Amino acid sequence: MIKFKMNILPIAGALILAGCSTLAPDYARTELPVPNTWQEQPDAQSKGISSEFAQQVPWKDFIKDQRLAKLIELALDSNRSLRETLADVESARATYRIQRSDLFPQIDASLSGNRTKTSTGDISTLYEAEAGLSGYEIDLFGKNRSLTQAQMEAYLASAETAKAAQIALIGEIANAWLTLAADSNLLTLAKETAANAQKTMDITNKRLELGVDSRIDVASAETIYQTARSDIASFTTQVSQDKNALRLLVGEQFEDSLLAGALPQSESLINDVPAGLSSSVLLARPDVLAAEHDLKSANANIGAARAAFFPSVSLTATGGLASSVLSDIFSGGASSIWTLAPSISLPIFNGGENEANLAYSKAQQEKYLAAYEYAIQSAFSEVADVLARRATIHEQLDAQASLVAAATRSYELSLARYKNGVDSFQNALEAQRTMYSASQSLISTRQVDLSNRINLYRVLGGGLADTSNENMTVAVTPEEG
């Protein structure tokens, strides 16, 4: 092992000076540019999440249907778009670590030998073992610390963006799954309607043979049948396309047993969110946090721009051993050598470059402040839209279900009157069309209700709390932060 003594005071002093505070402005979180609460609130009688915020409930506790939960788990592992976003996080993390390395001196060690013959014929030999640092900038005014802070905030912003992408993916998978379930419901309804229409056509044909009905009645009966046939073809195509879209989102093949053949009841699909929500929950939404980290990064860049107005001090220092005998280097018989070369640079005139950089940094801070506040306002608007739909969806569902029940009774009575020769076929036909249309609308409304519940959970920032995602580590470890 090479042993040598070296004056470590310059290096120790450099490290102490590098720990000085920066010239960046003190960061203070802006006040919420939105009201404290939403005009519409979830039902106070909601059960499931009780008083916890959506952000505190992992998606595995929110999604109750195990088929959907399995698809979401597969998507978080295999979705290619999400993988791309996670790769961006790792890139930002590496960039932060590169910038952070400027806070520490880079120490190199070398071992060299030199053998020289003079004009007199004398031969001299010199071996040297050295270690030292070269051109290390002592961070007196926090420029490197500010730049490192800026990169760390940029990394954290990318990490929050990845979280937002994961939450969005959870919502997309759930809504795509529900779309497939709704289209499957519509396909089943179209097949049932076609079967009923076929029976009605058989009745009108027999009555035509008996001279009771006219050909107009037969043709009218055929219209609802052909309409249902057309819908069967359309919804069959739509179901196949829904499956393709879901496979693209998941990113890998999965068993058809994970798909829903019909819309589930809300109680068996998901939990609910609490009443009395405060708009302050938006501050923990990943996209809002990402915007805030961008603002903090811009804030740190102001510190770096201010530091450029002050002198910069660099240090080059080496220390080691020298001997004409190589073995003395290792045995301790060599002489000690060292060099110390500090330098200072003071900006005097640069054509206004430093002033322009500072002005640019301040303008960027204003830009990211506006972006942060807009992110909060956008989040508030998203939640308000979902809550507005939530406030009326129950009434619409109840009305739509009552409409289907009334239309079904009307059709059954009209058909019975027609069979008994009391009423015309046109009344029965109109009743059947109304029942078919109302049933389709009920399926669509049920889909809207379930999607609204999922979207409310998503826009409140729920999805990743208390879950360990093997695909992404966003926390800054102590040695890095």
Image (spheres, rainbow, N blue to C red):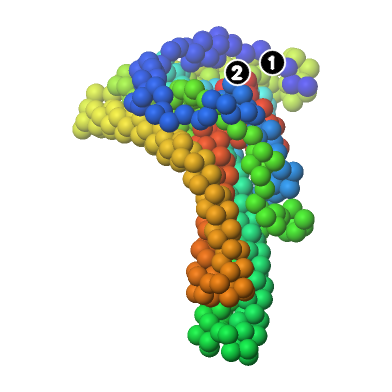
Q: Which image quadrant: the N terminus?
A: top right
How crowded is the residue under tag 2: few (<14 C-alpha within 10 Å), some, or many (20+)?
Answer: many
Mark 2 in CB contact with mark 1 (< 8 angstroms): yes
Q: Which image quadrant: the C terminus?
A: top right
Judging from the image, what secondary structure is the residue with disc 2 in? strand
**Residue type, label 1:** Phe
- Residue identifier under label 2: 319
Q: In this view of the protein, which residue sits in the foreground, 139 or 291?
A: 291
**Residue 259's quadrant in the figure?**
bottom right
Residue 451, horizontal then vertical, whole percent? 55, 46
Residue 426, horizontal then vertical, whole percent? 50, 74
Vertical position of residue 390 compared to residue 442: above or below: above
Marking on residue 378: none
How crowded is the residue under tag 1: few (<14 C-alpha within 10 Å), some, or many (20+)?
Answer: some
Q: In this view of the protein, which residue sits in the foreground, 452 or 296?
A: 452
**Residue type, label 2:** Gly
Q: In this view of the protein, which residue sits in the foreground, 354 or 125?
A: 354
**Residue 318's quadrant in the figure?**
top right
For the point 74% across and 43% down, the residue is 66
Q: Earlier in the sequence, mark 2 or mark 1?
A: 1
For the point 57% across and 26% down, the residue is 45
- Residue identifier under label 1: 4
Distance Cα–Cα, label 2 vs label 1: 8 Å
Residue 224, horizontal then vertical, whole percent? 55, 75
Vertical position of residue 281 compared to residue 428: above or below: above
Q: In this view of the protein, which residue sits in the foreground, 132 or 324?
A: 132
443 lies left or right of 321: left
For the point 25% across and 29% down, the residue is 359
